[in-house]
Structures are given as C-alpha cells and as structure tokens.
Image: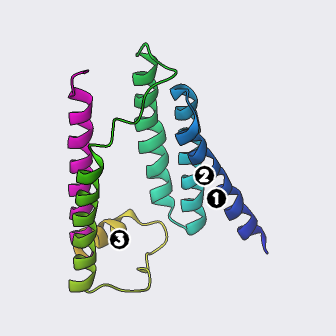
Amino acid sequence: MNFYDIIFYIFAAITILSALFVVTTKNIIYSAFYLLFTFFGVAGIYVLLGADFIAIAQIMVYVGGILILLLFGVMLTNKVTGVEIKSGTVQIMPAVIGTGIFMGAVVAAMFFTNWRSEPASLPAGTANELGHLLLNDYVLIFELLGILLLIALIGAASIARREKE
C-alpha cells in the first residue's frame, strides 16, 4: 500500500463517516456541519482522481453556496432540534416509480448510444475539453440528469408548500 492509497482511504473514511453523521444526527446545525466535511471529502477524492476542475467546482458550488444557504435557512428557523424529517409513507410508491423510470431512461441511453466501458480520456486540467465532452459525447445523459434535478426541485417545492395537517 502506497501513500496515494492511504490518502484515498483517509478521504473515503472522512466522506463516509461524515455522511453517516449527516443522516443520523438529530440536530440540524450539527448535520449541516457534518455535510461540510462530506463535501470536502468528496472534493479531496476528486483531487486524487485528477479532476481538479470538478474539485474546485465542488468546493465553490456546494461548500460556498449550497451549504451556506442551508445554514442560513436553518439558523433563521425556530425549530432546530427534534425536526421530523420523515414525511410519511405515501410518497414511497411515486418515488419508486420515478426512480424506476429514470433508471430505465439511463439504461436505454447507455444501450442505444455509443457507450464506452472505459472512462473517457480527459486532458489534465482543461475545462474546455470537459465542456466539449459534456455537450457532445454525453449530452443525453447530461440532459437526463438535468431532468432528474428538475424533478427533485419540484418535489422539494411541493413538500415545502404542503400545509400542516
């Protein structure tokens, strides 16, 4: 085992343990701070993989934007501890159906397009080539992920707007 493997296992352990603490902690503030360590662990793994652009985007977008917005939203609410996260079992069937449809679309896209089993060879550190690959070779999967994020946003908005019973 060389130094690279040890560093990878350290980042993987940080990511997995902090993600576990995110979902098991009752206090939302602590959960958000554990999410910070999860994002940094994922960014460290991206650096080890040689994906410097994605690592910087991870830190700028997720840590610098989403996590800070989440912390402000949590700190501006009154109820920080004992928040009921589970909303009920009514949403399980639509979630299973939606996930199945999305996975079917991804498998169909992989089957009917020129899918390569080896990873794409990216020049080191060029955002131009990454953009070219995303918008030419992998445009269908890129669009499907955009649709999935739109569905998640609509679901989150509908849960947030739901009236208290």
Disc 2 + disc 1, Cβ < 8 Å: yes
Q: Is residue 124 rendered magenta in the image?
A: no
Residue to which mark 3 is pinned: 129
Asked if 41 appears above or below 112 in the picture, the reply is above
The residue shown at (78%, 73%) is 2
Mark 2 secondary-structure assignment = helix
Left or right: 118 as drawn, with respect to 31: left
- State whether the magenta stretch is mostly helix, strand or loop: helix
Residue to which mark 1 is pinned: 12
Q: Is residue 110 visible?
A: yes
- Magenta stretch: give its range: 137-165
Q: Position of residue 43 (x, y in %)?
A: 54, 53
Q: Which of the 4 image quarters holds residue 33?
A: top right
Whole-number angstrom distance, CA of label 2 to CA of label 1: 5 Å
Q: Is residue 160 rendered magenta in the image?
A: yes
Q: Residues within 10 Å of mark 2 (few under 14, many from 20)?
A: many
Q: Residues within 10 Å of mark 1 (few under 14, many from 20)?
A: some
Residue to which mark 2 is pinned: 15
Q: Position of residue 12 (x, y in %)?
A: 64, 58
Whole-number angstrom distance, CA of label 1 to CA of label 3: 28 Å
The residue shown at (43%, 51%) is 57
Question: Which quadrant is the C terminus positioned in?
Answer: top left
The mark nearer the N terminus, 3 or 2, is: 2
Left or right: 127 as drawn, with respect to 103: right
Q: Residues within 10 Å of mark 3 (few under 14, many from 20)?
A: some
Q: Looking at the picture, which amino acid does disc 3 mark?
A: Glu
